[in-house]
Amino acid sequence: MKKRILIVEDEISIVELLRLVLMREGYEVYTCQSGRDAISTMKAVHPHLVILDVMLPGMDGSSIVRVMSEDDILCSTPVIVTSALVESQKLFAAYPQVKAFCSKPFALKEFVIEVKAAIGD
């Protein structure tokens, strides 16, 4: 069974790039483009990993991780945070489910390594 990854990202070009790269690696990929829909999508999809942008419409990435950490099921879902704002990394230091912070633009080989480490492959 393929492992499921949810990409929560509002920039469609980044969504498509990551989706293609991750599908080529053999993952089942779901996408969501707003913070507002992220939690409900996670509950529907039950991803093995969430790739989460910081700046999102509706609810930002740090708020999403806070909600996840308070949910009995979602608190164990690993997260990779992505952002062009490297200084936002400190917002996630208190959350053990955040396994990595990847700054934009991505170095795709390193990104795939982080994904495999976070998802346990």
Image (cartoon, helix red, strand yellow):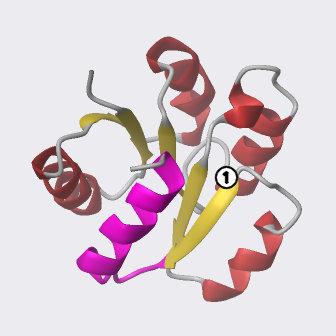
Q: Within 10 Å of the Cα at label 1, are there few (<14), some (14-19), or many (20+) other Cα atoms?
A: some
Residue picked out by circle 1: 60
Point 78% across, 65% down: residue: 92
Q: Is residue 86 above or below residue 118?
A: below
* Segment tinted magenta in the rendering: 103-119
Point 63% across, 61% down: residue: 99
Q: Is residue 86 left or right of residue 8?
A: right
In the rendered image, residue 94, in percent from the top left (x then y), is placed at 89, 62
Q: Is residue 31 above or below residue 14?
A: above
Point 40% across, 52% down: residue: 10
Q: Nearer the viewer, residue 111 or 86?
A: 111
Secondary structure of the residue carrying numbered label 1: loop
Q: Is residue 51 in view from this perspective? A: no
Q: Is residue 77 left or right of residue 52?
A: right
Residue type at mark 1 is Asp
Q: How many marks?
A: 1
What secondary structure characterizes most of the magenta part?
Answer: helix
Q: Is residue 16 left or right of residue 117?
A: left
Pick out the residue farthest to the front. Answer: 121
In the rendered image, residue 28, in percent from the top left (x then y), is placed at 25, 32
Q: Nearer the viewer, residue 39 or 121?
A: 121
Q: Is residue 105 above or below residue 38?
A: below
Q: Nearer the viewer, residue 74 or 58?
A: 74
In the rendered image, residue 7, in percent from the top left (x then y), is placed at 40, 45
Q: Is residue 73 left or right of residue 66?
A: left
In the rendered image, residue 38, in percent from the top left (x then y), is placed at 55, 32
Pick out the residue farthest to the top. Answer: 44
Point 82% across, 20% down: residue: 72
Q: Is residue 28 in view from this perspective? A: yes
Q: Is residue 108 magenta?
A: yes
